[in-house]
């Protein structure tokens, strides 16, 4: 198994900007290399809750394990990293460019308080799985 290094923090600052994300989506459609921020793409995320834990799945295929960074606070998780650019031939022209590259970052608010000492993360087959133990009431 490929485990991911986790950094624990007391709280996370900042949140994703809806306006910046919208502008990036619009302008990035014209030229996939264009962005107004360093956050070039947003991985798809699933969050679900079981009786004793919160589980997060992030779809980040093509991101090397050493490029994945996690910060976990009692009520939020920040996932960030970089997917490298794919080389293309010198004279090639894009007809379709839907696979984003570059830096990504997602800050997720959790539905319950979690125990930051009991967290694990595994990355396999392009899917990052983060398991967080719920804090007892």
Image (spheres, grey):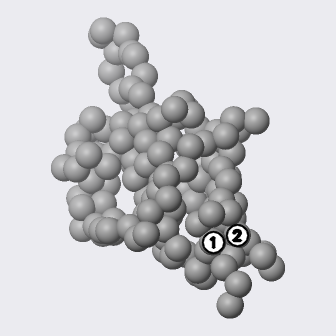
| Residue 136 appears anywhere in the view | yes
Q: Is residue 34 left or right of residue 61?
A: left
Mark 1 neighbour class, 10 Å CA radius: few under 14, some 14 to 19, many 20 or more? some
- Give residue 126's quadrant in the image: top right
Query: Are circles 1 and 2 on residues that touch, CB within 8 Å?
Result: yes
Ranked by sequence position, the earlier of labels 1 and 2 is: 1
Residue lying at 34% horizontally and 15% vertically, measured from the top left: 92
When the figure is inspected, residue 59 is found, relative to residue 17, above or below; the finding is above
**Depth order, front residue of 110/23:** 110
The residue furthest left is 36
When the figure is inspected, residue 24 is found, relative to residue 51, above or below; the finding is above
Position of the C terminus, as image quadrant, is: bottom right
The residue furthest front is 117
In space, the residues marked 1 and 2 are separated at their CA atoms by: 6 Å
Label 1 element class: strand
Position of the N terminus, as image quadrant, is: top right
Residue lying at 50% horizontally and 41% vertically, measured from the top left: 68
Q: Which mark is residue 55?
A: none
The residue furthest bottom is 137
Pinpoint residue 36: horizontal percent, then vertical percent.
Answer: 19, 49
- Give residue 134's quadrant in the image: bottom right
Residue bearing mark 2: 133
Pinpoint residue 17: horizontal percent, then vertical percent.
Answer: 28, 67
Residue lying at 52% horizontally and 73% vertically, measured from the top left: 74
Pinpoint residue 22: horizontal percent, then vertical percent.
Answer: 29, 62
């Amino acid at each position: 198994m490929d485990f991911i290094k986790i950094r624990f923090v007391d709280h996370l600052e900042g949140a994703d900007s809806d306006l910046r994300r919208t502008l990036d989506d619009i302008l990035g459609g014209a030229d996939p290399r264009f962005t107004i921020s360093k956050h070039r793409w947003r991985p798809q995320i699933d969050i679900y809750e079981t009786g004793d834990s919160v589980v997060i799945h992030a779809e980040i295929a093509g991101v090397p394990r050493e490029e994945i960074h996690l910060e976990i606070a009692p009520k939020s998780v920040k996932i960030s990293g970089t997917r490298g650019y794919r080389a293309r031939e010198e004279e090639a022209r894009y007809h379709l460019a839907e696979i984003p590259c570059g830096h990504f970052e997602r800050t997720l608010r959790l539905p319950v308080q979690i125990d930051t000492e009991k967290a694990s993360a595994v990355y396999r087959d392009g899917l990052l799985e983060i398991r967080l133990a719920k804090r007892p009431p």
